[in-house]
Image (cartoon, helix red, strand yellow):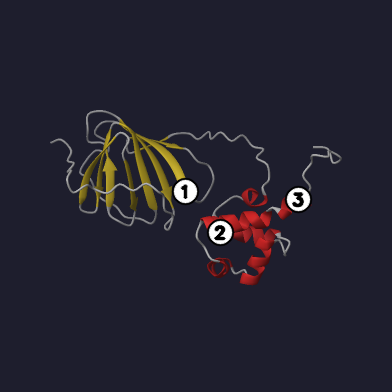
Amino acid sequence: MAPDDPGAITSEEVLTTVGPRLRALRQQRGVTLSQLGTATGISVSTLSRLESGGRRPTLELLLALARFHRVPLDDLVGTPQTRDPRVHRRPVLRNGVTIVPLTRRPGGVQAYKMIYPPGVPVGEPTQQVHEGYEWLYVLSGRVRLLLGGHDLTLDAGEVAEFDTRTPHWFGNPYDAPAEILSLFGPQGERLHVRARPSPTKQNHPPN
């Protein structure tokens, strides 16, 4: 916009929106000012003044808060989106599974579409553990999930969510392709749909 455009948003107006954005983001994550101060090294009084508009945000403060919340700096200052929002990521073939990344922002929750041909992966299932939290939604086909002592079959439309520090493995031992939407986040991230094994239903793959 031209500088004399009456509809132009000034830098001062942008900065006045930072406080409410910071407060809303902190409250959405259920973090107290004290916890945020400990994690970022910013004093509670400074954080409180930033949220109330009593202190002008500096780049140093905003960078520390953006890192903690795992959001782009633009999200804190409300900068208009200018880049193409479409995600163009090349599929990766790994152990017979086609993995399509659906996100491009570093950090935070990452989304993937995974396509499993029949009988993939090959060989005996080997459960693994690692840091993180995973959410799986079966788009089509069926998927076998081993989670600790549970042996489950997830059908199209079913969801599972689990801490990846629990031994786990999932694959497609069946005779039709399967497609999965996977959301993977750092330890401590939690999603909202949880699938637990029903005591009245046992799922086992075909022999």
Which residue bears the numbered disc 2?
26
Look at 22% across and 29% down and name the residue there.
175
Image disc number at residue 202: none
For the point 48% across and 34% down, the residue is: 90
- Residue occupying image coordinates x 68% and y 66%: 49
> Mark 2 against mark 1, which lies toward the viewer?
2
Quadrant location of the N terminus in the rendered image: top right
Q: Give the farthest residue toward the top.
A: 176
Q: Is residue 207 left or right of residue 188?
A: left
* Alpha carbons under labels 2 and 1: distance apart: 17 Å
Q: What residue is rendered at 53% in x and 68% in y? A: 35
First of labels 2, 1 by sequence position: 2
Sort mark 2 into few (<14), some (14-19) or many (20+) by Cα contacts within 10 Å. Answer: some
Image vertical order of residue 20 relative to residue 198, above or below:
below
Spatial CA span between label 1 and label 3: 31 Å
**Rendered location of residue 5, percent (x, y):** 83, 38
Residue 43 appears in the rendering = no
Answer few, some or many: residues within 10 Å of disc 3's Cα (few below 14, many 20 plus, some between 14 and 19).
Answer: few
Give the residue at mark 1: 109
- Helix, strand or loop at mark 3: helix
